[in-house]
Image: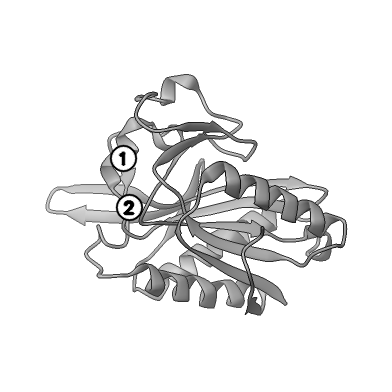
Amino acid sequence: MIGWAVSPGLTDYETAVAAMEARAGAIANGEAGELVWLLEHPPLYTAGVSSKDSDLLAPDRFPVFRTGRGGQFTYHGPGQRVAYVMLDLRERGRDVTKFVQNLEHWIIGALADFNVKGEIRDGRVGVWVERKGPGWSREDKIAAIGVRLRKWVSFHGIAFNVEPDLEHFSGITPCGISAPQFGVTSLVDLGLPVTMSDADAALRASFERVFGATELSQPPA
């Protein structure tokens, strides 16, 4: 059964990454079980392996961390649920494409619990929501995905916007996408009075439908 851990409050980014990488290594060595770890970070920007320095628009605004996950620049902060996903793909077919698709299905399923239609788009990583009004339409990202594998064990994961300060995204070009018809949104920005506990419940239920049963566990030390 997959462990499911939730850390209260805000968790320091470097501390979290060190604990996550240690746990992923233990999983690879057969010394620990699979784990999904839910937390929130203080405001910060992270740069994936495909990031461009020109996409960091406000380099002095928040701390910036270079990370080995896939993708480009991403914001993390209060009101955004980060889920670090440490799964053993040796037991799951060693299929990276399917794994990423399952992460997308997980997020889309959680959004559906709030009657939000999440969609994926070719060439744009993450999960998007189509928004329309009189004479206008746009697509806003509601969740980012950035993962890495080591010895077929995944780490890093997803960032799901529940109620972050969306203005904080203005310090970067999120995921390298700057076209005006694309933006960032959250469940609360869509007009839904969703708490973090509500989001966690939807994420866990959808995760179990996609990946299998979970059990409450302690966060990695």
The correct choice, above or below, for 205 with respect to 199 in the image is: below
- Circle 2 residues within 10 Å: few <14, some 14–19, many ≥20: many
Residue ID at (41%, 46%): 42
Instruction: State the image quarter where residue 148 is shown.
Output: top right
Identity of the residue furthest to the top in this view: 54
The amino acid at mark 2 is Pro
Residue position for label 1? 168
Residue ID at (69%, 72%): 2
Residue position for label 2? 164
Identity of the residue furthest to the left in this view: 134
From the viewer's perspective, tell me whether residue 140 is left or right of residue 8.
left
SS type, badge 2: loop
Tell me whether circle 1 and circle 2 mark residues in contact (CB < 8 Å).
Answer: yes
- Measuring from the top left, give residue 29's x and y in whole percent: 87, 56
SS type, badge 1: helix
- Measuring from the top left, give residue 97's x and y in whole percent: 68, 52
- Circle 1 residues within 10 Å: few <14, some 14–19, many ≥20: some
